Amino acid sequence: MAQESATDRGGRTRRRRPLRMVGLVLAVVLVCAAGLGAWAYFSLSGNLKSVDIDAALGKERPENVDNGSKDILVLGSDSRAGANKDLAGGDTGGTARSDTTMIVHIPAGRSKATAVSIPRDTLVTRPACKTSGGSSLPESQRVMFNSVYTAGGPSCVVKTVESMTGIRMDHYVEVDFAGFKELVDALGGVSVTVDQAIHDKESGLNLTAGTHKLDGTQSLAFVRTRHGIGDGSDLGRIGLQQKFLLAVLSEIKTQGVLSSPTKLYGIADAATKALTTDSGLSSLTDLADFAKSLKGLDAQRMDTLMLPVAYDKQDPNRVIAAEPQAGELWAALKADRPVPDSAKKSPATGN
């Protein structure tokens, strides 16, 4: 099974790290789908790819608690196959890892959301599962979270997350590299503000402190940069990804995208080409219906968190879920109640 290259606490890496995607494409599609007319449905629905998670996992899942909330697993993979082959760095052999993972919890009221990032270097127990090819994969302990996708594919990632959290994932959304770049360019760029200069030779990102309008290529560098910020660790990069997610949502609102059918179609076209979803969101009609239920959601009401983690005692280059904080976090989301401050503190970061 392929393993991710190690990164030490000082941020040194044994090889170049691939891009860290964020869960922004889902938000864009849901917002845009609500504003498109039926005339565009056939064309855009044809862009979507889907996987049948329910069929793959069967009944071995957490209870489907009907409290009105929704939990979405948003994953960005580092595959460099197909349209991604010309993007710098990463794997060109056709394999992939879950390079970024976020659980997006949307409460029953649909007016706010909580996005929880899972660091890719987190050591987890991967439960026995069926791979994308239909073969059986045995349980394995102390595997890196991002290797689960390589070994088993989407359904194994979902099963691992459900085993970690005790929360049933209502939907699955996967984003690819090339689609991410095209989406940002279709938006006309995204404005981000950084508090300090970022100069990262690995990602090619060079920004002075202040506000910048990033195009697709620069945005890829922004969400993958690590060496130019903080102590250069993988944990620091999560903060930039979450900042970018909120910036995209704000950009859509600021630009008045929903009032421009031409621009709206272009953005939705780029977004749907970037997505693989579960069968429950496999058509634009499904996305539009879901989007309409989220019309009250605003970037200012999205809470971005990281799974509380601590450095592993056996391997300080890896992290493990910190307890009792992680348990409190998952319990709050499962019960659809606010996450307590005590569940947001991560020993690995000191916050």
Image: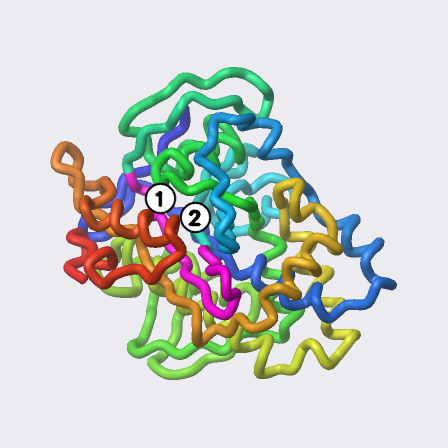
Position of 129 relative to 322 (above/below): above
Circle number at residue 101: 2
- Tell me residue 154's x, y (percent): 53, 35
- Marks 2 and 1 in Cβ contact (< 8 Å): yes
Which structural element holds mark 2? Answer: strand
Along the viewing direction, whichever of 239 and 221 lies nearer the viewer: 239
Q: From the viewer's perspective, tell me whether residue 147 is left or right of residue 188.
A: left
Along the viewing direction, whichever of 159 and 223 lies nearer the viewer: 159
- Under mark 2, the amino acid is Thr
> Per the image, is 347 magenta?
no
Instruction: Please name the residue shown 38% across and 47% down the image.
Output: 17
- Under mark 1, the amino acid is Arg
For the rendered model, the colour scheme is rainbow
Along the viewing direction, whichever of 199 and 223 lies nearer the viewer: 223
The range drawn in magenta is 105-122
Identify the mark nearer the N-term, 2 or 1: 2
The answer, for residue 151, to whether it is visible in the render is yes
The residue most toward the right is 39
Position of 230 relative to 83 (above/below): below
